Amino acid sequence: MALTRRTVVKGLAASGAVALSGGLLGHSLSRARSLVSHDRPLAIPPLLKGERRGDARSYELMIRAGARGFLPGRKTPTIGVNGDYLGPTLACARARS
């Protein structure tokens, strides 16, 4: 392949676009990190033991829409199970043979 002015210009334009997008992406990530609060405790879902029926365990689960404030002053639409966000931890015991 011959090196022409056109291929050099295309290569420079492509590398400039990649460098520019990397700089913008890095700026966006650092801004997003500054908005996130690290002093919030980790949300641990409650344990749902269910009800044993013979060899099976039964759970009552309801899917609900809600909203949660992940960032200060902003509500984000969420979907959760038995609540507005996340869902319970399901206890599953093996059936005895």
Image: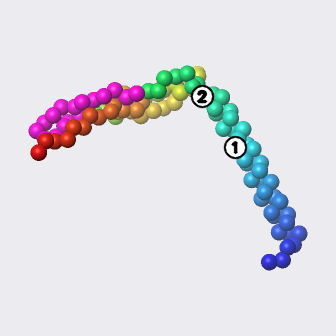
- Looking at marks 1 and 2 on the same chain, the residue that comes earlier in the sequence is marked by 1
Is residue 9 magenta-colored?
Answer: no
- Figure check: 84 above or below 3: above
The region drawn magenta spans 44-60
Residue in view at x 30 percent, y 28 percent: 47
Say which quarter of the image contains residue 31: top right
Residue 64 visible somewhere in the drawing: no
Q: Nearer the viewer, residue 6 or 34?
A: 34
Residue in view at x 63 percent, y 28 percent: 35
Coloring scheme used: rainbow
Q: Which residue is mark 2?
A: 36
> Horizontal placement of 83 versus 95: left or right?
right
Q: Position of residue 52 (x, y in %)?
A: 15, 34
Residue in view at x 57 percent, y 25 percent: 38
Is residue 50 magenta-colored?
Answer: yes
Residue in view at x 83 percent, y 69 percent: 7
Question: How far apart in space, not on screen, are marks 1 and 2 (Cα)?
Answer: 17 Å
What amino acid does circle 1 point to? Leu
Q: Which residue is mark 1?
A: 25
Q: Position of residue 89 (x, y in %)?
A: 33, 33
- Figure check: 28 above or below 4: above
Q: Position of residue 5 (x, y in %)?
A: 89, 69
Quadrant placement of the N terminus: bottom right
What amino acid does circle 2 point to? Val
Residue 43 visible somewhere in the drawing: yes
Circle 2: element type: loop
10 Å neighbourhood of mark 1: few (<14), some, or many (≥20)?
few
Circle 1: element type: helix
Number of marks present in the image shown: 2
